[in-house]
Every structure is written in C-alpha cells, then in structure tokens.
Amino acid sequence: MSAQIERMTLARAITRALDDALTEDPKVVMMGEDIGQLGGVYRITEGLMAKHGKHRVMDAPLGESGIIGTSIGLALRGYRPVPEIQFDGFVFPGYDQITSQLAKIHNRTDKQYTVPVTIRIPYGGLIGSVEHHSESPEALFAHTAGLRIITPSSPHDAYWMTRKAIEHPDPIIIFEPKRRYWLKGEVDFSDTSFDPFKAQVVREGTDATIVAYGPLVPTALAAAEAAAEEGRSVEVIDLRSISPMDVPTVAASVEKTGRLIIAHEAPRFGGVGGELASAISERCFFSLKSPVMRVGGYYLPYPVSGVEEEYVPDMDRILDAVDRAFEYEL
C-alpha cells in the first residue's frame, strides 16, 4: 500500500482516529462529560456527535463511576465503548470500576467475556491549570493486572494507538499528553502494522540511553541534542507502552550504551521508572557503566500553575542526570 501521509496536530490525529473508528465499526460508541455538543474541553471530539449521532457520541452526567460502569455493560453486550475522562485527576471516582471490575472480568469469567473498553485520559502538566487537571496517575493503573496502558508522543502514534486500542479485545487506557495536543507532525495512514506495545528508538546513540514516554519525549530529544553539542551520543527511546512494558528494546540499547536515564512527569517515587530501572538492572547488570538514573516530578501534590515549571522535569534536569551517569567510571 502506498503511503498516505498528512501533517496535523496530535489533537486532530486523535479526532481523525475516533472519526474513522466510528465510521468503520457501528459498535464503536463514545461517552463523556461535554464530549458531544461542546466537543470536549480540548475539542478532541468536535463535530463527531453531529456526524455520527447522539446515540453514538453521548454526553454523560458528571459521574466517572457511571461512565465507566456503563461502558463495561456496553462492552459485555458487544459494543466497543470509548469513554473519555475529562481530566486526569477526575478518574478516581471511576477507579474502583476500572480496577475492581474492568481489569478483572476477562479472568474472572475464565476468559468467556471480553471487555474492549478504551478509556481516554488527558494527563500531565504545564497547561497553567490546577491540581486534578495536571496530574500523571499512570503508575496507579499500571500496577493493576488486566489493563493495558499506552501513551503517545506524536501525531502518528496518537492516531494509530487510538485505532489499535479500539480494535483490541482487552481494556486499554490511553493517557493523552494534553500539553502536546498542539504538537504537529506527519501521520502515515497506511501504517496498519503499527504496534502500540512496542517501544521505538526515536534517536540513535552510542554513549547513553534516555527512555521517556508521552509528554517528555520531545524534552528528551532536546536533551539529546544538547548533549551532542558536548560530544555525547545519546540514544532516545519512546517507551510508548507502560503496560506491557517493552523491556527487550530498552535492554538492547543499554547493552550498547552502558548508561540509562529514565524520565517521566509523574513523581519519581513509586513511578514507572522504578519498575523499568529494576528490570534493566536485573537484565543488563554487567553492561551498566553507572547506576540507572531516574528523573521525575517531586513527591508532592501537583503545585499551583505559578511554580509548575519548577515541578515538571525539563531538559536541564534530564541533562543533569546524563552528567551524573558519566561521572561513574569502572
């Protein structure tokens, strides 16, 4: 198939993916707070209710537990629901439904039932907002077996992650990096072999590896560019999938570079980076030239917008971790 490439924002890539899924599969339905007539607070679902009808794109009451519970019921009846949680910090009223019911039904019924629910959650900070609108709770869900957790960093990945998630039989949470909604890039609509659970080497290098996901991938790439000016060749990997985690791709890079820096917006303590650091330490111990370095948010509730730039990891904090990794010598 010849390439079908268009340039668009990450937000529009998600809109296109949702539109295409609704068009191609009559069992796909969407629900969420203000997603219909308003088109969502970020206008991701703009125009979809008018095009596909109120029975396919449904405005829901302010009740995340009801949104998730209804989605589970629809999935058990053969539909493919795509509920939206308006902001990251709003997911917790539906946390019990997600972790106690959605994640366990397939196993609980001895694989007799599947629940193909795709939950969309805008997440992350640096949008000038307050707590409950700027958080990164991905590690809380990654600890629950039965859920798949993915997050895009580019328009291409955003389109295909959304399409593949909706088609998948398992429940999947897509954490959408809201501060990257306006990031522009090319989307290849012919890339049907796209694997959302496979990490991607987005920049090759030989001296150190930076692993990031979601909103911090562009930041990691900027850090690698800055490190190159100092003569350091840094490889950058977009983890893409938090659960399952593509450890082999990261391990292959670390076996080559000998150094690993892991960066995410969520607090470093108890974060996804700790799990990856442990897995790489076990697998690549004799290849490591330094301890695995982790960069994350501080172990504090998300701060007011006036100081959030001090809280969210930036290029300088990633570069500092790179410098510390190079301080170790065998």
Image: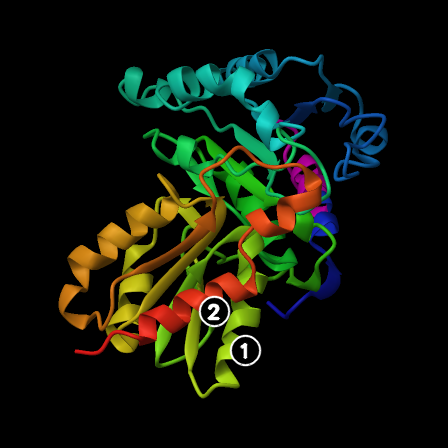
Residue 319 shows which numbered tag? Answer: 2
For residue 80, which quarter of the picture?
A: top right
By secondary structure, the bulk of the magenta-drawn segment is best described as helix
Q: Amino acid at mark 2?
A: Leu
In the image, is residue 306 above or below residue 27? below
Badge 1 marks a residue whose secondary structure is helix
Q: Residue at x 43, y 20 (%)?
A: 102
- Quarter of the figure with the N terminus: bottom right
Q: Amino acid at mark 1?
A: Ala
Q: Residue at x 18, y 71 (%)?
A: 287
Expressed as whole percent of the image width and height from the top left, the position of residue 101 reads 41, 16
Q: Taking 128 as reference, is 195 left or right?
A: left
- Nearer-N-terminus badge (2/1): 1
Residue 22 included in the magenta stretch of the image: yes
Decide which of 243, 270 is in the foreground and name it.
270
Expressed as whole percent of the image width and height from the top left, the position of residue 249 reads 33, 63
Determine whether label 2 and label 1 are within 8 Å by CB.
yes
Residue 307 included in the magenta stretch of the image: no
Over which residues does the magenta segment extend?
Answer: 16-28
Q: Taking 160 as reference, is 249 left or right?
A: left
Q: Residue at x 63, y 70 (%)?
A: 2
State the residue position of label 1.
226
Is residue 329 visible in the rendered image? The answer is: yes
